[in-house]
Amino acid sequence: MTNKKRIRFWAIFFLVLFGLFIVLQVPAVWLLKKFAPDQRMLQNVSGNIWQGQADWNINTLQGTVHWSTRPWELLRLRVASQVTVHSGQTQLQGVIAYGVAKNIYLQHFNGKISPETLSALVAWQWPSTSINVKDLSVNYKGKTGFQSAEGQLSWSGGMLNYPIEQRFERIDIPPLVGEVSVEKEKLKLLLKDSQKQRMADMLVGADGMLDVQITQRFLLHSPSYQGKAGLDTAVISTRQPLTSLRGQ
């Protein structure tokens, strides 16, 4: 490479770097008003694209979000930020990225989901214990579905009351560990007990449908259950829209 070409290369490089720096200083609230003037999920936005914070609300859930942009991710053809999400006692932190082909990435999420947050998502009477999230990573591609996922959820359980046929059913949930994976482009959560025995599994697809299988082993923790199937038998299998849980 000649001296003239080297000078031209470094000149272009620093101009791009300077332009990126200018873009990152754009106020986040201006960006929202410009490109999403009708959004109501975020309020009290402060900071810029580089880093900032905002209040958020989704239905009855509300909290705060902090972000810090990772500009080097542009070299991987995606936009990414380190985020921390709070809602009451719930706190999750990790990386959110958006790439080519409408790929959405959640990377290395850790934290906990409180029972208050669970009650806002699904209107049941939950145990007073949080779900712990460890190294959760998910790759979702457009309308195709989930491409990869890994991570672990753990829960110490407790007494759960859920509505069924106009009454509340009770079940004493044992400590559970959930392993996250992908099966046929669906996000899968396999629940096991402390002895690593299958308790239940859940599948969520790109169509928003939730498939659930609950084993005999799990249902035996309900005082009113009288079934006599094999412990690994999927006694209950349901398929319903994920959004329908909120209405129960």
Image (cartoon, helix red, strand yellow):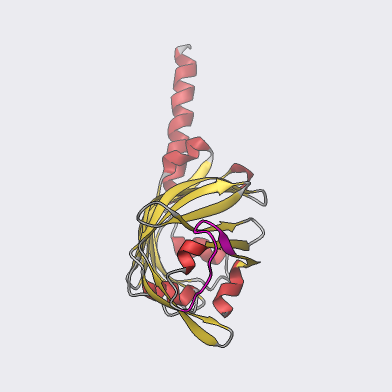
Quadrant housing residue 147: top right
Quadrant housing residue 212: bottom right
Name the residue: 52% across, 43% down.
78
Nearest the eye: 59 or 237: 237
Name the residue: 67% across, 52% down.
143
Nearest the eye: 18 or 142: 142
Do we see residue 139 in this rendering?
A: no
Q: Position of residue 156 (x, y in %)?
A: 33, 64
The outermost residue toward the bottom is 166
Tell how many labels. Answer: 0
Name the residue: 63% across, 44% down.
101
Q: Position of residue 196 (x, y in %)?
A: 40, 51
Do we see residue 196 in this rendering?
A: yes
Mostly what secondary structure, the magenta segment? loop
Q: Position of residue 222 (x, y in %)?
A: 45, 74
Task: Using the image, determine if residue 208 lies above or below residue 103.
Answer: below
Q: Which residues are magenta?
A: 224-235
Answer whether residue 43 is magenta in the image.
no
